[in-house]
Amino acid sequence: MGKSIKWLAAGVLCAAAFGAQAQVNQIKVWAAACANCHGTNGRAEPGMESLAGKDKDEMLQKLMDFKSGRKPATIMHQLSKGYTDEQLAQISAYFAAQKK
């Protein structure tokens, strides 16, 4: 009986680790969509806004303002509407964690 519980616990831990890795990969996919303007991992070319290492709360507020229409934009208001608030928070956290 004890060995069965250990194997079950090991299986649950492996599944949890796989789920966490899948979530990280999904966030990277969302962030990659920003690379055209904001550069790979948020490191933009001169003339564009870099996102790497910026404050996540400030980035999230900007994204929410784009999404609601409070902040004017050429394309960001359209792009931000394609994500849930939670997804935007995860994208902001991803870019904030990147080195400048």
Image: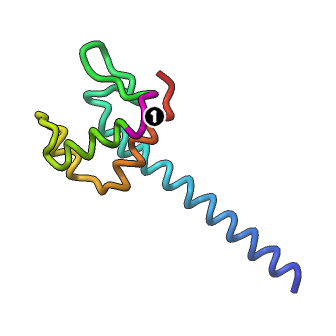
Q: Note whether 76 is above or below 45 in the view shown.
A: below
Q: In which quarter of the image is the N terminus?
A: bottom right
Task: Please tell me whether residue 19 is drawn above or below residue 78 in the rendered image.
Answer: below
What is the magenta range?
53-57
Circle 1: element type: helix
Asked if the stretch drawn in magenta spans residue 55, the answer is: yes
In the rendered image, the residue lying farthest to the right is 2
Residue 55 higher or lower than 60, as above or below? above
At x 40%, y 40%, the residue is 57
Task: Determine crowd level at label 1: few under 14, some 14-19, many 20+ residues with C-alpha closer than 10 A.
Answer: many
What residue is rendered at 46% in x and 28% in y? Answer: 53
Above or below for 1 versus 24: below
Residue hosting label 1: 96
Q: Is the magenta stretch mostly helix, strand or loop?
A: loop
Residue 47 position, x and y percent, is 24, 15
Q: In which quarter of the image is residue 86?
A: bottom left
- Residue that protrudes farthest toward the bottom in the picture: 1
